[in-house]
Amino acid sequence: MISVVILGAGNVATHLFRGFSLAENVSVTQWYSRNLTTVEQYKNEVDITDDLSDLKVADVYIIAVSDDAVAKLSSKLEFENRMVVHTSGSVGIYDLDKKHNRGVFYPLQSFTKGAAMDFANVPICIETVDKKSYPLLKTLAKNLGSPVQKVNSDQRRVLHLAAVFVNNFTNQLYRIGHEITESEGAEFDMLKPLIVETAKKIEDLSPYRAQTGPAKRHDKKTIKKHLKQLDDNNHHKAVYELLTKSIQKTHGRKKL
Amino acid sequence: MISVVILGAGNVATHLFRGFSLAENVSVTQWYSRNLTTVEQYKNEVDITDDLSDLKVADVYIIAVSDDAVAKLSSKLEFENRMVVHTSGSVGIYDLDKKHNRGVFYPLQSFTKGAAMDFANVPICIETVDKKSYPLLKTLAKNLGSPVQKVNSDQRRVLHLAAVFVNNFTNQLYRIGHEITESEGAEFDMLKPLIVETAKKIEDLSPYRAQTGPAKRHDKKTIKKHLKQLDDNNHHKAVYELLTKSIQKTHGRKKL
């Protein structure tokens, strides 16, 4: 049985708490939040506290707070030589106080408040300063049912950056699609099967091979038509132009 | 039983042929291609021809050729007053020769050569000049198992444009994610669950509400870090900057 203390009360902390509660070989010993009301609803399931000097002994302390607060919180922990990990994609492992046995336990997924998350779809990126600690974190992730990957800090940083492209920026393209369709009274819902298909397509095909459309075909006539349609929205037009250029940069000149 | 003649031998034509072959109440009477070798492999399943003067009588003629070729092919058909539809998102219904009973049968999906397509995931956008013809096309689409929507030419054009954003441009963001991760020896595969989750999230939530990340949070520190990581690729940097701006334009200033 692995004992865990969770520190923080945001989305990641809450999803981890739910995940560990379902795990057979993990017990959450305690849940810390500086603001007790945020975790009060769980007080019948787990020991809660807002007092760092009151933290119990556990195998792993998981710091799941905002990026800026990780380092400071880790140094405020009053014990030494215990396993302390953070869950951030962009904070370095050495930002944790060196009095701890340091690690990273980064779930590569976008958590939504309220919505349940199947951890089978949440790869956990693990890094440890002391490689002897890796198996413990791996077992912890496996108990969630998650795929596990050893990922160093540089790799984690690029995964976090790439996640912004494939998650935040992609979602913004959905938003633009929404604005464009609604502007003509067309239904955005009609695009949803295409959106899911686009995501699923790259499970078997590289994004390079999966690319289609007027930009890749250098279909100037259609591109011109589209730009004309976007004439009353310079902003959408700029996105269209830049991503068309981006596709053409990736795929090169049209074959004659 | 609805009889159909397919004209063209590209992705859409081939997928429609497969779809209709499985449909109970549709029979494909003939398949025309100007280049017979492209459809020769189907000659035991359907009558094939490369001769427009040899076309048989059918309830519906489906022109599934490149956008530029639709108008000309429709005018070369040697009969009149029969139902002739095209399958293009961006060609007008009046581009079909007016001697025909004109319609549009636009499948809003991205077809991949070779990969099977479940037509339940392919909304068909239907438009007819003569509204009495609508039920026939609707029945045809229903026979494929597809959702059907009446869509006028303006709506179809914005759906086609929006499809470029949510399909082609989204796929290019996947490609950039691929380039970024591979550059550090991280695995793009790790991002696939996030990609699928991002697409699925908007089934219940509007893209507006689904947005997360540093751009929406106006998290200047993370944005600055990311831009620095992209310093050796001006192109990726430009995409990052523009889409960050786009998200901030949609979601407004940070609440203080």
Image: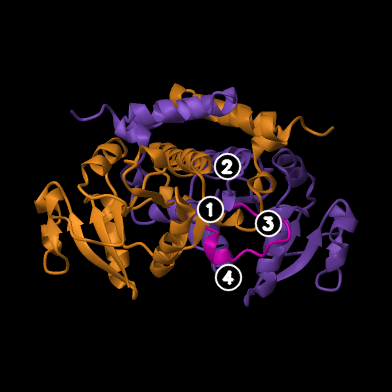
Chain colours: A purple, B orange
Sequence order check, earlier mark of 4 and 3: 3
Depth order, front residue of A228/B243: A228
Q: Chain of mark 4?
A: A
Image height of B126 relative to B221, above or below: below
Mark 2 or 3 closer to N-term? Answer: 3
Is residue A222 visible in the rendered image? The answer is: yes
> How much space separates mark 2 and mark 1, taking CA atoms?
10 Å
Is A130 situated above or below A138? above
Q: Residue at x 45, y 38 (%)?
A: B169
Residue denoted by label 1: A190
Q: What is the quadrant of residue B138 in the picture?
A: bottom left
Q: Is residue B73 left or right of residue B23?
A: left
* Viewer-side label of 4, 3: 4
- Between discs 4 and 2, the one toward the N terminus: 4
First-in-chain label (2 vs 1): 2
Residue type, numbered disc 1: Met
Magenta-drawn segment: A108-126
Q: Position of residue A210 (x, y in %)?
A: 34, 46
Q: Nearer the viewer, residue B221 or A183?
A: A183
The residue under label 4 is: A143
Q: Which chain letter goes with mark 3?
A: A
Element type where label 4 sits in the image: helix
Point 65% across, 54% down: residue: A111
Q: Earlier in the sequence, mark 1 or mark 4?
A: 4
Residue that carries the numbered disc 2 in the rendered image: A181
Q: Amino acid at mark 3?
A: Arg
Which mark is drawn over residue B75? none
Q: Name the residue located 42 percent from the left edge and 38 percent from the top edge.
A: B172
Circle 2: is it few (<14), some (14-19), or many (20+) Cα within 10 Å?
Answer: many
- Residue B230 horizontal/vertical position (percent): 49, 27
Task: Note whether residue A249 is visible.
Answer: no
Q: On the image, numbered disc 3 is attached to which residue?
A: A82
